[in-house]
Amino acid sequence: MLRLLTPHYRIGRVWELTPERLQQWGLHTLLLDVDCTLTRYSQGEALPEAVAWIEQLRLSGFGLCLVSNGMGPRIRGFAERLELPCVAKAMKPLPWGIRQALRKLQAEPSQTAIVGDQLFADVLAGRLAGIRSILVDPIHPEEEPWYTRMKRLPERFLLARHEAYLSDTLSRQHSDIHTD
Ligand SMILES: [Mg+2]
């Protein structure tokens, strides 16, 4: 169960994901969450940094598609301004929206990752669909509705556990090196 809620990668903001880093990870396609990932909650446009980043990835040949639980008209408008395909009302963490996006882009699941800010929506949906996931820090999570903010506490708990596990593993590997 814990594995289903563990992101493959973690990063602060989407625009830190350079084409070079994504290529190193063997990724050619990104499915992008919208709210708190590309912009503040419930906005009509992506932040300028996100717009520039999307353009950079597009020029580098990456496949991109928005996959959002947001309502159709807002997400479609958002996608049109970015000139990207989209799946709205995706019902993450169910995997169907992701599968729909994979079909739209004819993308290879092993070379695709979902990028989003929520363990219980984006990461879980990615795991259930069999693709990788990249967790970003949420942009202004205090603006989210109560039902999303409720999930932030268990999310922080799980991430802290995950980090403790990672640093424990790393320090053990480190001490192994020294004892060998
Ligand atoms: Mg989000």
Image: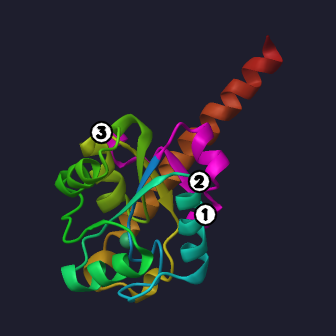
x and y percent of residue 17 in the render? Answer: 61, 57
Residue shown at 39% from the left, 89% from the top: 43
Query: Hey, what amino acid is under mark 1?
Result: Gln
* Left or right: 102 as drawn, with respect to 27: left
The label number, if any, that marks residue 56 in the structure image? 1
Q: Quadrant of the C terminus?
A: top right
> Which residue is drawn at the image coordinates 82% and 19% (left, top)?
178
Q: Which residues are magenta?
A: 1-28
Which residue type carries mark 2?
Ser
Name, please, the residue furthest toward the right: 178
Q: Which of pointers 2 and 3 indicates the residue nearer the eye?
A: 2
Do residues under tags 1 and 3 come within 8 Å of each other at their CB atoms? no
Rendered-image quarter of ligand 1: bottom left
In the rendered view, would you say 45 is above or below 69?
Answer: below
Question: Would you say residue 17 sits in the magenta stretch?
Answer: yes
Identify whether 136 is placed above or below 113. below
Q: Element at badge 3?
A: loop
Residue 13: tell me if it is visible.
no
Disc 2 designates what residue?
60
Label 1 secondary element: helix
The residue singled out by tag 3 in the image is: 130
Q: From this viewpoint, is residue 23 visible?
A: yes
Which of the two residues, 23 or 155, is positioned nearer the viewer here?
23
The residue lying at 49 percent from left, 49 percent from top is 161
Between marks 2 and 1, how big is the CA–CA gap?
Answer: 6 Å
Asked if marks 2 and 1 touch (Cβ < 8 Å), the reply is: yes
Q: Is residue 147 magenta?
A: no
